[in-house]
Amino acid sequence: MIELRKKEGLSIVELLEKLDNSNLKEKDIKNWEIGLKYPDLDTIYKLSEIYKVPSTEFVQAKNNSYEKGLAGVNKKIIRWIAYTLNVSFYVGTVITVLIYVGALAFAFMFFLAMAYSV
C-alpha cells in the first residue's frame, strides 16, 4: 500500500485529509502499510478511489496475507519492530534475526558457564 501512496505523491497527512475520517490517525496508515492492520470496507472503497485501484485488490491482498500465515508470531514481532523503529519490513526482519541470534548466543554462554561452575 505504501507504493500506491508514494505513486500518487501523497504524504501520510495528505492521505488522511483525502480520507476525511477524524477517527483515523497517522499510526493507522502506517499499520496498514506494513500489514499490521487493515482498513475497514468503507475506507477500502475510499482508498480505491484515491489510488485508482479496484477495491477487490485491497480485499484480496488482505485475504492473501491471512492465507499465507502472516498472523504468525514471527511476522508480528518483525512488523512490530519495523513499526516501532519506523524501518522497512526487510530491516525489521534483519533486526529480529540479530535479536534471535543474540538470545541464542546468550543462552549458550549461560548454560556453558553453568556447566563449568559445577
Image (cartoon, grey):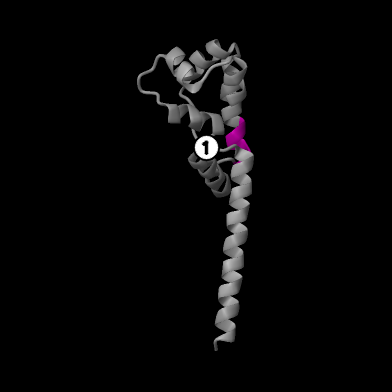
Q: Is residue 1 visible?
A: no
Residue 108 is situated, as x and y percent measured from the top left of the image, at 61, 71
In the picture, which quadrant includes the N terminus? Answer: top right
Extreme residue in the left direction: 22
Q: Quadrant of residue 5?
A: top right
Amino acid type, callout 1:
Asn
In the picture, which quadrant includes the C terminus? Answer: bottom right
Neighbour tally class for label 1: few under 14, some 14-19, many 20 plus, Cα within 10 Å: few
Secondary structure beneath dot 1 equals loop
Residue name at image x 51 percent, y 36 percent = 36
Q: Nearer the viewer, residue 88 or 34?
A: 88
Q: Is residue 74 visible?
A: yes
Residue range of the region highlighted in magenta in the rendering: 64-69
Residue 87 is situated, as x and y percent measured from the top left of the image, at 56, 38
Q: Is residue 41 above or below residue 92?
A: above
What predominant SS class does the magenta segment belong to? helix
Residue name at image x 50 percent, y 30 percent = 30
Q: Is residue 27 magenta?
A: no
The residue under label 1 is 86
Side of 53 where 31 appears, left or right: left
Residue name at image x 57 percent, y 49 percent = 74
Q: Nearer the viewer, residue 78 or 57?
A: 78
Residue 95 is situated, as x and y percent measured from the top left of the image, at 60, 49
